[in-house]
Amino acid sequence: MKIVFLGTPDFAVESLEALEAAGHEIALVISQEDKAKGRKAIVEKTPVKLAAERLGLPVQSVHRLRTDEDCIRRIREIAPDFIVVSAFGQILPKEVLDIPRFGAINIHASLLPKYRGASPIQQAVLDGEKESGITTMLMAEGLDTGDILLQEKLPLDRKETADSLFQKLAELSKTCIVKTLEGFSKGEIHPVAQEDEKASLTGIIKKRDGFINWNREASYIERMVRAYTPWPNAVSILPNGKTFKIWQADAVNKPDEEMLSLGKIQRGDIEHFLGDNFKEEYIPTDGAGGLFCSKNKQKLFFSTGKSFLEITELQVEGKKRMATSDFLRGYSGKAE
């Protein structure tokens, strides 16, 4: 099969490599533009572009496919059997969807129609789902609204993070897309319309989404820690004004040992950190937002709207990730 592949992040690399290994002709790889990253604003190629170059495949970067007439013309000249899309990051116009002989197929990291949109992996973890999976579908003009071709399910671990689920689903996507192209081209897989009434939508995650509202219950915040690992991380402020990320935590009803108070998050620090994104709902009430440690200074807790969050690994601004015991040895409770 002759394929034009569109993808951008690491997730899409697995499918690209699987299609190439299966003997399909990858006539063109299209990825989003290279972007400047980090404090030094170093321009980096996308993971898909790097993979295409490593595999010796023709690759093209686009800013906005919908308005890139040269790129669309190139796809039309190739006359592919399939267009395969995996986390490309743009909605394809109808004139592109109509080009391939068999159709444009999208690889989506959820069991559609649940979790359409940009962040299905994070949302599945945040909602405490017991399973997720990969869906391949015929692309339509809407956002992840096309007919389903194949679905493969995957159980979630109790401590699943977005990062671990990302890797598992990327691996699962390899077999799914190869099976889909073979079965659909032979007429063995038939499109099934999505049940729109069961659909849910996920949005683009922003850095501010990781800021913790301590009025939420501990179980939700614990899922938030896992859903936003490795980015944007669950973030909050210590009573001394320092910001910190939580890498690992557990929800506990009430600490067994006697606790020592280390203070409470200050309203002014929250307002300063959130700036224009500040909302009154982030101000801890009714005992929430208090920092405590065990009497032996080995365990760290935050009070929440319901129960406590025990933090086992964290990272204070300007420092490396550390275990709670290491943090408590150096924590004075005062701004440095």
Image (cartoon, rainbow, N blue to C red):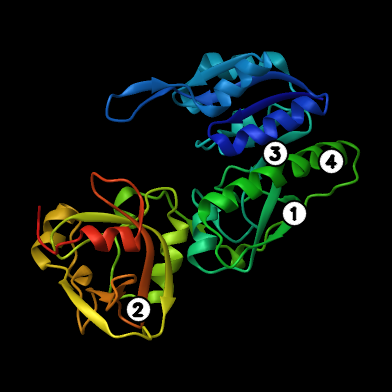
In the rendered structure, which amino acid carries the disc numbered 1?
A: Gln
Instruction: Report how far apart the C-alphas of labels 3 and 4 lie in the structure.
Output: 10 Å
The image shows residue 234 at horizontal and vertical percentages of 35, 58
Instruction: Report how far apart the C-alphas of labels 1 and 2 lie in the structure.
Output: 38 Å
Q: Earlier in the sequence, mark 3 or mark 4?
A: 3
Numbered circle sitting on residue 164: none
The image shows residue 284 at horizontal and vertical percentages of 20, 75
Residue receiving disc 2: 308
In the rendered structure, which amino acid carries the disc numbered 3?
A: Ile
Q: Nearer the viewer, mark 4 or mark 2?
A: 2
Nearer to the camera, 102 or 16: 16
Residue receiving disc 1: 151
The image shows residue 334 at horizontal and vertical percentages of 10, 61
Q: Earlier in the sequence, mark 4 or mark 2?
A: 4
Numbered circle sitting on residue 105: 3
User: Quick one: SS at disc 4?
Assistant: helix
Residue receiving disc 4: 184
Q: Earlier in the sequence, mark 1 or mark 2?
A: 1
Instruction: Report how far apart the C-alphas of labels 1 and 3 lie in the structure.
Output: 13 Å
